Image (cartoon, rainbow, N blue to C red):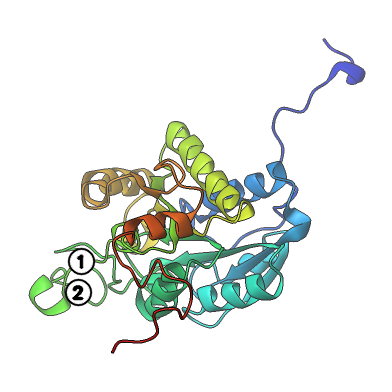
């Protein structure tokens, strides 16, 4: 048996994750994702420079769980708060941690406009297809025919419309540098999710533009399933509707950042490629 001098720590709690009890339900994947965020902050050595923005929703108390500076935002306003912090403190690593009701419902305007402006922030987006904290109502991401507290006969797309695919939606915006959709239902997928989260932070650190990682997740409590049954339901129903993968990566496409990629897409527009104000307004 090796003595203490030869002992090596191979697994421990990330320094950026505080040793506290969380409020999450058994089987909830928020705990997994928050650990991955903390591991990335540790490995990038940015905990002391990081500022997180907590949402309204199940992760409303994230300010108690992370060791970095945290700010609580009003419902849906995390991207606006993150924008303000990043513009005032451009050298800080700023991230918003949001659920689907917070990001894709009341906060959709803030989400879209922060993305299209190319704000150099990182967003971790938890998509569990339901409003979790407030009792299981239909969310913007609830699937067609999905039964929730406010759609007891299933989501009727004729009256409620179709779910919002956030990664696909944001991929069309010029300010976005990196988008990926992941899940955390297996060790393999947890490793992929961590890689994506770390890349999103690196995208910000390198000044490339807006980045978002969407995590397809579960809500065993409001789905009325065991944690394992919830993973099975997610694989069977959510992943076909919300396919995993990279939805935008300007560096992989050969550009230095989102601005360079946007300029290339607008290469045929004389006004866009003129010096500021040179062409004036429409005549």
Mark 2: give few (<14), some (14-19) or many (20+) Cα within 10 Å: some
Q: Residue at 49% x, 44% y: name it.
A: 196
Q: Position of residue 67 (x, y in %)?
A: 74, 59
Q: Position of residue 9 (x, y in %)?
A: 77, 28
Q: Residue at 36% x, 71% y: name it.
A: 104
Q: Quadrant of residue 204?
A: bottom right
Q: Is residue 109 above or below residue 262?
A: below
Q: Residue at 27% x, 74% y: name it.
A: 149
Which is more toward the observer, 206 or 10? 206
Mark 1: give few (<14), some (14-19) or many (20+) Cα within 10 Å: some
Q: Quadrant of residue 1?
A: top right
Q: Is residue 19 above or below residue 108?
A: above
Which is more toward the observer, 56 or 40? 40
| Residue placed under numbered mark 2 in the picture | 151
| Residue projecting furthest to the left | 158
Which is more toward the observer, 176 or 103? 176
Q: Position of residue 115 (x, y in %)?
A: 44, 67
Residue 19 visible in the snapshot: no
Residue 197 visible in the snapshot: yes
Query: Is mark 1 in CB contact (under 8 Å) with mark 2?
Result: yes
Q: Residue at 46% x, 81% y: name it.
A: 277
| Residue placed under numbered mark 1 in the picture | 147
């Amino acid at each position: 048996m090796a003595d203490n001098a030869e002992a090596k720590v191979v697994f421990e709690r990330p320094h950026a994750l505080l040793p506290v009890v969380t409020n999450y339900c058994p089987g909830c994947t928020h705990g997994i994702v928050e650990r991955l965020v903390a591991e990335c902050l540790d490995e990038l050595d940015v905990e002391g420079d990081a500022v997180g923005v907590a949402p309204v929703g199940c992760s409303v108390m994230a300010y108690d769980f992370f060791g970095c500076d945290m700010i609580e935002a009003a419902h849906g306003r995390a991207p606006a708060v993150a924008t303000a912090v990043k513009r005032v403190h451009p050298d800080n690593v700023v991230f918003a941690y949001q659920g689907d009701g917070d990001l894709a419902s009341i906060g959709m305007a803030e989400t879209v406009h922060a993305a299209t402006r190319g704000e150099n922030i990182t967003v971790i987006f938890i998509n569990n297809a339901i409003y979790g904290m407030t009792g299981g109502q239909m969310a913007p991401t609830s699937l067609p025919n999905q039964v929730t507290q406010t759609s007891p006969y299933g989501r009727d797309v004729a009256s409620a419309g179709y779910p919002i695919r956030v990664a696909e939606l944001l991929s069309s915006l010029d300010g976005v540098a990196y988008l990926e959709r992941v899940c955390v239902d297996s060790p393999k997928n947890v490793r992929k999710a961590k890689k994506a989260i770390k890349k999103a932070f690196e995208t910000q650190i390198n000044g490339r533009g807006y980045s978002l990682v969407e995590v397809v997740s579960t809500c065993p409590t409001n789905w009325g399933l065991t944690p394992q049954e919830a993973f099975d339901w997610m694989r069977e129903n959510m992943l076909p509707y919300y396919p995993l993968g990279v939805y935008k990566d300007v560096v992989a496409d050969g550009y230095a950042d989102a601005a360079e990629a946007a300029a290339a897409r607008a290469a045929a527009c004389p006004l866009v490629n003129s010096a500021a104000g040179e062409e004036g307004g429409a005549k």
